[in-house]
Image: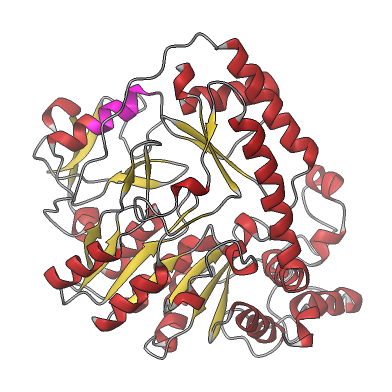
Amino acid sequence: MNQNQNKAPIFDAAMKYAKLRPAYFCVPGHRYENGPGSLLREYAGDNIFKIDITETGITDDLHCPVGAIKEAQELAAELFGADHTFFLVNGSTCGNQAMLLSAAGPGEKILVDANSHRSVNSGLIMNGAEPVYVMPEYISDWGIPGGISPAEAEKMFELYPECRAMLVTSPNYYGIISDIRALAEICHRHNALLLVDEAHGTHCCFSEQLASGALACGADMCVQSLHKTGGALTQSSLLHVRSSQVDIGRIRKSLAIVQSSSPSYILLNSIDTARRDLALHGKGMVRRAMELAAEARKKINAIRGLRCAGRELEGKSSVFCFDETRLVISASQLGISGFDLKAMLFEDHNVEVEMADRNNILAIVSYANSPEDIEMLVSALKSVAEKHADGIPLPGMAKPPGQARFAMSPRDAYFAKKKAIPWEEAEGCVCAEMIDISPPGIPLIRPGEIFSADILNYLKQIRLSGAYIQGLPDETMETVMAIE
């Protein structure tokens, strides 16, 4: 590894500028620590505002980097094994959008993992491409999506050979990692690009116990949320390219569309310094997270009525590898839904977990967690289990609907005239909005998709389970948006 990984070029540039402290007549208007909101300044201190600056000859320009930002991106590319790396300050959302904008255009087809984040749908609205969805396997014991089957990907390319690319989410929110190497080989054999939403997998590149990162397995492009598992601040992400088939000029133009023209230098510093820490200490950071998670998993599985998923998932439902820093925990045998369990943990025990679904909660363990955090989680779960020891197991839930049927592209549906209609009248109509639960932000139905009886029944079950569904036209959740 290049010894320059010890450097932090953007941070160094910010420190140089802060030391000069020129009379400042640029945006932002708070003028270092002199003008931010008094409450925020009192809490945060002064230094953070000294690096909230703009493009200058010293601090460089994200959209046309020639100095510190260019050097920092090159260091990140070296660390992650990319040909090119781009810093993202609008989160992985804009990275997914940029990948799609660069890979396909209006009317062209692209294979899309049906377990993709809502940002993928917004990217399809932008580029006007027609998605062909690839259904992930289903892990019925847990009620969660599994991996993308290489055999299913091959089948879809044979049915739709004109597809320009395939976009896969790996790891997914639950830590399920697909066989990216096999999927890359299939894509390239069909002259298509493999794009990977690796937002939840930055840390995978720093552990031999986890599957190699997407780039190392042959992906042409991938997006990583450095803030999710890499220690950066929220909205700090990376877009990596490792392919001679990707038009870098088009990527740059796409990023100019989806990224702010006033990028946050606080976030750019966050990306730069997090990359440095991962380069110097990444393996130890991930090892610590996995050790903490292993201890938690062992103790949770010893609690009567609870279970916590682990490596036993591998080799089934197209699960190539399972990220053990994810604690997928179920209390369904005690009659407790994931939504209720999440609420109990926070309201009664001051423990916050990432998300819940009908059957499970998800707790993400980081290198920055402490043994005390783990003990609080385990103790809270034990208390809940003891209190509900006589609970009646939850009944099973219907499997999510199969392959989606589209009447029009997401883009056409987005611009079409819409109306709110009662759920009871929706069957056969065309959906006009994304309907999802966030997190995880995976659409349950997408614009342009036809409301089938199966979809409506599944949405009804989700609604009755206590989930707050986004994308409905009213808070009562009595109507849906359809194309007129």
Task: Give the quarter of the figure containing the N terminus.
Answer: bottom right
Would you identify the image quadrant in which residue 460 lies? top left
Question: Could you say which is closer to the camera, residue 102 or residue 66?
Answer: 102
Hey, which residue is sitting farthest right in the picture? 19
> In the image, residue 303 lies at what x, y percent?
61, 24
Q: Residue at x 26, y 49 (%)?
A: 446
Instruction: Identify the coloring.
Output: secondary structure
Horizontal placement of 331 versus 272: left or right?
A: left
Horizontal placement of 213 versus 268: left or right?
A: left
Task: Give the quarter of the figure containing the C terminus.
Answer: top left
Hey, which residue is sitting farthest left in the picture? 428
Region in magenta: 458-465
Q: Mark yes or no: residue 350 visible.
A: no
Q: Residue at x 62, y 39 (%)?
A: 297
Horizontal placement of 435 versus 229: left or right?
A: left
Looking at the image, residue 366 lies above or below residue 18: above
Q: Residue at x 47, y 32 (%)?
A: 360
- Inspect the magenta stretch and tell me whether residue 464 lies in it: yes
- Inspect the magenta stretch and tell me whether residue 173 lies in it: no
Looking at the image, residue 356 lies above or below residue 326: above
> In the image, residue 472 lies at what x, y percent?
31, 35
Q: How many numbered marks, from 0 up?
A: 0
> In the image, residue 331 lies at what x, y percent?
50, 25
Q: Mark yes or no: residue 266 visible.
A: yes
Hey, which residue is sitting farthest top in the picture? 390
Question: Could you say which is closer to the camera, residue 94 or residue 48?
Answer: 94
Looking at the image, residue 370 lies above or below residue 104: above
Would you identify the image quadrant in which residue 113 lies? bottom left
Magenta residues: mostly which secondary structure? helix
> In the image, residue 67 lies at what x, y percent?
70, 88
